[in-house]
């Protein structure tokens, strides 16, 4: 290489995506770059210049970009190694922002023609330009995974499709096959399950070695009986396109060891066992979920709550995506909470009688959205139906002592009591269906600051256990009422826009007194709030932030690529939170002391750059929210 190439290699090796370029592509790029100087205050690019003609790579200094015509579009800062204007070059249009040097700036510049040629030449560069935040996020996640994997073993990726995991044809038989013949076949083929199918190879049932003891040996069933007499009917199945983590979720929720894979027309494609998804010694997801269901006292659940956190750490090391990770964690937390409630309900003698079928335990906030991290307190409530001959106060009098016991048991398991007392043990949140509708109507009609605060928590409710139909009825009613009240949605949007992502004008980030950023309040919340408003406006009943964004985006005619950029940004900030919690626990910090504060100066160059881009996406989302509600 020439002396020029050698002198520039350290610079490009330190900045994405050039650090992953093939050597020949990097040489090609360097040969075509021009280095230009801009004095403080000088404009590098602006809309009046027409179609963008240059691709800028900042070598030294700081450049600010901002739009003159949009109050909601805040100024952004670009520093060493960052590039612009990718969007304008891809679309062959003018830039929409004015880019100005904040100080003396040196920039490498590539012509638009060479930019497009590089796109065709380098898959890395094309991926970066067309999926900027996603590509950077993947690079950061790979680095984090490599770091965590030093203390955890590798595993099958949970993002694989079931079709990719299937390794062998399923062993099947007809429903009239004698049990003796089935057992002989299973022994000869060394399989632990037999799938019973009809003439069209559609599954009717399943029989496993686990069933042999309880259904045959201990029950004294003759092995001359047809297999249909002892099989488990209507086994759970998923399509080949489903992902491994979805199969794992089914196993965890229901305690199954197997999931069938069937085509859309019902024809059997294969079978997956837990061993196909996990090495049992490494993850033990089903064992953990089974142990949670079978725990016979609170002390056992306290110990199992620590296993949940250990499993979360291992999944992070395996590269499980942030949305899948929070879903797994929320599901296991659900199982733990359900068992706490079952134990305490039985101890209180309320598992029988008129209340047993007419009460629903609700979870709100991150629990209601299935987006819990290791730092989560209790946000829960009770919804009940008033039995004939009783009043709401009568029901409350019976339920509140139980709710108090449950709340304190959950606190022992690592879920701190809510400082704002948003818990089922608070009489204010132990209400009948009619009372919940009255309080929701009051919040929607008045829109006070307190009502908007409560709406941001309670509108994300989800049934945990009990009479789920009550929660479904309340959700359906709320979606209809909220969607019809544009004034309330306007107030929610206005309130959400007060929480601006912490991007600075003088510095990269706006930090607090301790020079930190709250990743929950300033990072996650802008996405969650906007998604909730879009979801309510579109009549979406789902509570997950990602589902709300995707489903409402379709109804509100927001381009899928825009939605995906918001989701990628949200997931990166969520992964930073999870990493922060994991590192804190590794350093001996207790659950109640975990926080969401991060010092951006401690981040590596890549993560710092992605965090800036993630906050920019949050501002774009807020700009869209402001546009929808004319704010």
Image: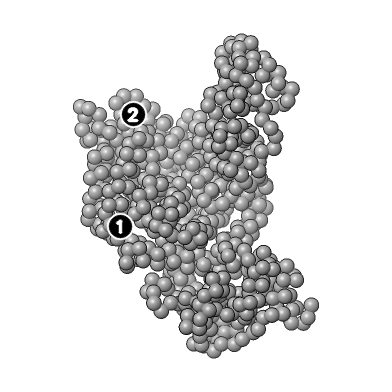
In percent of the image, x 60 and y 82: which residue is there? 107
In percent of the image, x 57 and y 18: which residue is there? 228
Give the foreground label among 1 and 2.
Answer: 1
Question: Where is 40 relative to 194, above or below?
Answer: below
Query: Depth check: 394 or 462 in front?
Result: 462
Residue 397 at least partly seen:
no
In percent of the image, x 49 and y 58: which residue is there? 560
Left or right of residue 360: residue 519 = right
Q: Residue furthest right?
A: 1
Question: What percent of the width, then of the height, locates residue 273?
Answer: 63, 34
In the rendered structure, which disc, 1 or 2, sits on the residue that comes first in sequence? 2
Q: Secondary structure at mark 1?
A: helix
Left or right of residue 439: residue 625 = right
Give the quarter of the image for residue 356.
top left
Distance from Cα at disc 1 to Cα at disc 2: 35 Å
Question: What percent of the width, then of the height, locates residue 114?
Answer: 65, 76
Q: Residues within 10 Å of mark 1 (few under 14, many from 20)?
A: many
> Mark 2 — residue?
357
Question: Where is 476 relative to 484, above or below?
Answer: above
In percent of the image, x 24 and y 40: which residue is there? 434
Q: Are marks 1 and 2 in contact (CB under 8 Å)?
A: no
Q: Secondary structure at mark 2?
A: loop
């Amino acid at each position: 290489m020439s002396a020029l190439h050698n002198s520039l290699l350290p610079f490009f090796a330190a900045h994405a995506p050039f650090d992953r370029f093939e050597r020949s592509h990097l040489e090609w790029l360097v040969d075509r770059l021009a280095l230009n100087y801009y004095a403080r205050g000088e404009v590098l690019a602006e809309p009046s210049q027409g179609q963008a003609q240059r691709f800028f790579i900042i070598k030294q200094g700081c450049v600010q970009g901002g739009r003159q015509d949009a109050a909601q579009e805040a100024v952004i800062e670009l520093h060493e190694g960052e590039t612009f204007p990718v969007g304008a070059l891809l679309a062959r249009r003018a830039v929409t922002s004015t880019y100005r040097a904040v100080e003396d700036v040196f920039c490498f510049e590539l012509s638009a023609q060479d930019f497009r040629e590089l796109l065709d030449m380098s898959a890395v560069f094309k991926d970066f330009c067309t999926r900027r935040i996603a590509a950077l996020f993947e690079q950061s996640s790979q680095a984090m995974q490599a770091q965590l994997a030093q203390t955890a073993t590798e595993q099958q990726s949970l993002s694989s499709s079931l079709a990719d995991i299937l390794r062998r044809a399923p062993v099947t038989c007809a429903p009239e096959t004698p049990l003796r013949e089935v057992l002989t076949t299973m022994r000869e083929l060394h399989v632990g399950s037999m799938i019973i199918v009809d003439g069209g190879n559609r599954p009717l049932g399943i029989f496993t070695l686990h069933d042999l003891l309880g259904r045959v040996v201990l029950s004294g069933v003759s092995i001359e009986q047809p297999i249909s007499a002892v099989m488990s009917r209507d086994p759970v199945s998923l399509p080949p396109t489903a992902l491994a983590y979805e199969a794992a979720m089914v196993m965890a929720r229901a305690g199954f060891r197997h999931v069938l894979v069937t085509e859309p027309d019902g024809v059997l494609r294969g079978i997956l066992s837990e061993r196909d998804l996990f090495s049992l010694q490494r993850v033990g997801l089903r064992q953990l979920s089974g142990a949670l269901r079978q725990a016979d006292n609170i002390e056992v659940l306290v110990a199992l709550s620590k296993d949940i956190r250990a499993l979360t750490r291992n999944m992070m090391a395996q590269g499980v995506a942030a949305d899948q990770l929070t879903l797994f964690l929320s599901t296991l937390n659900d199982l733990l909470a359900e068992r706490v409630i079952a134990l305490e309900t039985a101890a209180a003698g309320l598992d029988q009688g008129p209340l047993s079928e007419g009460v629903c335990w609700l979870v709100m906030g991150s629990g209601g959205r299935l987006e819990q991290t290791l730092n989560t307190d209790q946000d829960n409530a009770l919804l009940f139906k008033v039995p004939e001959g009783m009043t709401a106060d009568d029901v409350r009098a019976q339920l509140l002592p139980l709710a108090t016991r449950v709340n304190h048991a959950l606190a022992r398991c690592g879920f701190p009591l809510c400082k704002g007392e948003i818990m089922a043990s608070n009489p204010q949140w132990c209400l009948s269906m009619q009372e919940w509708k009255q309080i929701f109507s009051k919040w929607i009609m008045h829109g006070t600051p307190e009502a908007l605060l409560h709406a941001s928590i309670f509108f994300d409710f989800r049934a945990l256990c009990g009479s789920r139909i009550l929660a479904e009825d309340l959700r359906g009613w709320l979606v209809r009422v909220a969607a019809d009240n544009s004034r309330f949605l306007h107030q929610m949007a206005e309130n959400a826009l007060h929480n601006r992502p912490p991007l600075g004008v003088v510095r990269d980030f706006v930090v607090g007194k301790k020079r930190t950023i709250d990743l929950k309040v300033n990072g996650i919340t802008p996405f969650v709030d906007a998604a909730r408003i879009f979801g309510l406006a579109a009549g979406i009943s789902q509570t997950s932030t990602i589902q709300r964004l995707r489903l409402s985006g379709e109804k509100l005619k927001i381009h899928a690529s825009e939605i995906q950029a918001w989701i990628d940004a949200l997931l990166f900030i969520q992964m930073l939170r999870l990493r922060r919690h994991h590192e804190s626990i590794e350093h001996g910090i207790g659950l109640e002391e975990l926080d969401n504060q991060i010092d951006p100066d401690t981040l590596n160059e890549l993560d710092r750059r992605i965090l800036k881009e993630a906050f920019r996406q949050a501002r774009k989302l807020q700009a869209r929210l402001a546009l929808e509600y004319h704010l």
